[in-house]
Every structure is written in structure tokens, then in C-alpha cells.
Image (cartoon, helix red, strand yellow):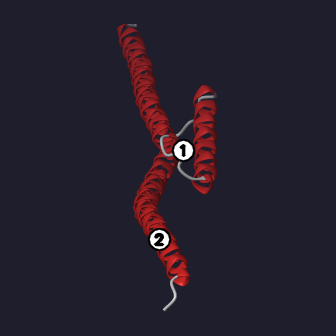
Amino acid sequence: MKKLFISAMIAMLLINSVILYFLFNEKHEKQVVIEQKTSLEQDYKSVSDTLDAKRDEIDQLRGKNAALDKLISEKEQMIDQEKAALATQLSKNILTAADLDHARKMIAQDEVTIASLQNEVSQYKEQTKQLTTQKEQLSTDLNCEKETTAQLTDENTGLSKKVEVGSFLQI
């Protein structure tokens, strides 16, 4: 009877040990999932903030050129779509690290596009500056020509009067 009692105690101890193992293992797995979800949400917030910043950066380039404005609108639309897709995936708890990596790659591509747009804007500004300088020079030249024409016209008028007076003289 004593052996049976000891065997029952050992069996119960083993069963309790297995139950405790599964209980702590499940608790640990839940903790890992919670940590991963928290990390994913932080990554999502970071990516979302970066997308907003890039959208604002692109929007600052608007109004410089009609072709650029069209490209800017397309890029803004792509950013909005990506952000909406990420928000939907997060709300449905199907957002993965791969999705965020894809968004980060898109952000990197947007940074290249923004740099290109900024370069184009600076080129347009330089061209505008050159054209403004040329316009000012042409305006100055035109004013000089007008003054010269006016002087020549006055001189011509004076000479015409002298010729007219000289024609009355008989030589």
C-alpha cells in the first residue's frame, strides 16, 4: 500500500511538473508574441511617421513646375496608398515585418525621387535666375537702344532742319 501511495505521489508530481512546464511555456510564448507585437507596432509608427515626413517633403516641392506637380501628386498618392495598406494590415493583425521592410524600401526609393526632384527644382531655379539676368540685360540693352534712337532722331531732326535751311541758301 505504501508503494502504491508513493507511486501515485510520483505520478501526480510528474503530471504537475508537465502541467507547470506547459503553463510556463505558454506564458513565455505569449510574452514573446506580445513583445513582437509591441515591436511591430513601434516599427509601424516609425514607418508611418517617416511616410508622413516624406509626403510633407515632397509637398514642399509643389508649385514649381506643372510636370513636377503631376509627379509629386503621383508620389503622394502612392505614399497614401502604402500607408493605408499598412494601417489596414495592422488593424487586422496581419502586419508582418516583411510588410514593414517593403515600406522601408519604398521610403528609400522615395528619398531618391525626392533628391531627384530637389535637383530638378534647383536646376529650374538656376535656369530662372539665368533667364531673369538675360531679361534684365535685354531690357537694359533695349533702353540703351531707345535712348540712342531718340538721340539719333533728335540729331536727324536737327540735321534735317539744317538741310532745309541750307537748301534756301544759294551757292
Going from the N terminus, do you reach mark 1 or mark 2 first?
1
Label 1 close to label 2 by CB (< 8 Å)? no
Q: Position of residue 42 (x, y in %)?
A: 41, 29
Which residue ends up furthest to the bottom in the rendered image? 171
Residue corresponding to mark 2: 158
For the residue pair 126 and 30, the one nearer the viewer reads as: 126
Q: Residue at x 47, y 52 (%)?
A: 105
| Label 1 to label 2: alpha-carbon separation | 58 Å
Q: Residue at x 59, y 42 (%)?
A: 82
For the residue pair 147 and 13, the one nearer the viewer reads as: 147
Q: Position of residue 98 (x, y in %)?
A: 51, 46
Disc sitting over residue 107 in the figure: none
Name the amino acid, label 2: Gly
Structural crowding at the residue carrying mark 1, measured as other residues with C-alpha within 10 Å and reported as few (<14), some (14–19) or many (≥20): some
Give the quarter of the image for residue 19.
top left
Q: Is residue 4 above or below residue 99?
A: above
Structural crowding at the residue carrying mark 2, measured as other residues with C-alpha within 10 Å and reported as few (<14), some (14–19) or many (≥20): few
Q: Is residue 110 above or below residue 135?
A: above
Give the quarter of the image for residue 20.
top left
Q: Is residue 105 above or below residue 1?
A: below
Q: Is residue 146 above or below residue 165?
A: above
Residue corresponding to mark 1: 62
Name the amino acid, label 1: Arg
Q: Position of residue 139 (x, y in %)?
A: 46, 61
* Mark 2: secondary structure: helix
For the residue pair 13 and 94, the one nearer the viewer reads as: 94
* Mark 1: secondary structure: loop
